[in-house]
Image (tube, rainbow, N blue to C red):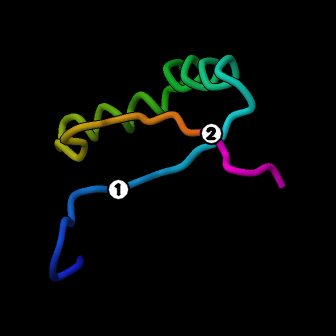
C-alpha cells in the first residue's frame, strides 16, 4: 500500500464496441453464478464502498 495519498481507490478501463455490447455484457454478468457469488462476497465483506462509472471516448483509433 502507498504510504501517502489515497489507498482506497481503484480504476479499471474496459472497452466495448457499442453501448449495446456493454448492455449485453452487463446482462450476462447478472446471469453468471460465479459473478453473482463474487459480488455477494464483496457486499458482505464491504470491499466496494462506492462505484462510479464514467463513459469515455478514445482520443485516437489505432
Q: Position of residue 9 (x, y in %)?
A: 27, 56
Specify whether 27 is left or right of 62. Answer: left
Q: Main secondary structure of the magenta part?
A: loop
Residue located beneath label 2 in the image: 57
**Along the line of sight, which residue is nearer the eye, 58 or 48?**
58
Specify whether 56 is left or right of 11. Answer: right
Task: Name the residue located 33 percent from the left edge and 35 percent from the top edge.
Answer: 52
- Distance from disc 2 to disc 1, alpha carbons, whole Å, reads 20 Å
Which mark's residue is nearer the viewer, 2 or 1?
A: 2
Specify whether 33 is left or right of 18. Answer: left
Task: Name the residue located 44 percent from the left edge and 36 percent from the top edge.
Answer: 54
Magenta residues? 57-62
**Quarter of image, res 39:** top left
Total count of labels: 2
**Along the line of sight, which residue is nearer the eye, 37 or 24?**
24
Residue located beneath label 1 in the image: 10
Against 18, residue 39 (above or below) is: below
Amino acid at each position: 500500500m502507498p504510504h501517502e495519498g489515497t489507498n482506497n481507490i481503484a480504476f479499471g478501463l474496459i472497452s466495448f464496441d457499442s453501448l449495446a455490447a456493454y448492455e449485453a455484457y452487463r446482462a450476462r454478468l447478472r446471469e453468471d453464478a460465479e459473478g453473482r457469488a463474487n459480488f455477494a462476497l464483496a457486499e458482505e465483506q464491504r470491499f466496494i464502498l462506492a462505484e462510479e462509472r464514467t463513459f469515455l471516448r478514445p482520443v485516437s483509433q489505432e
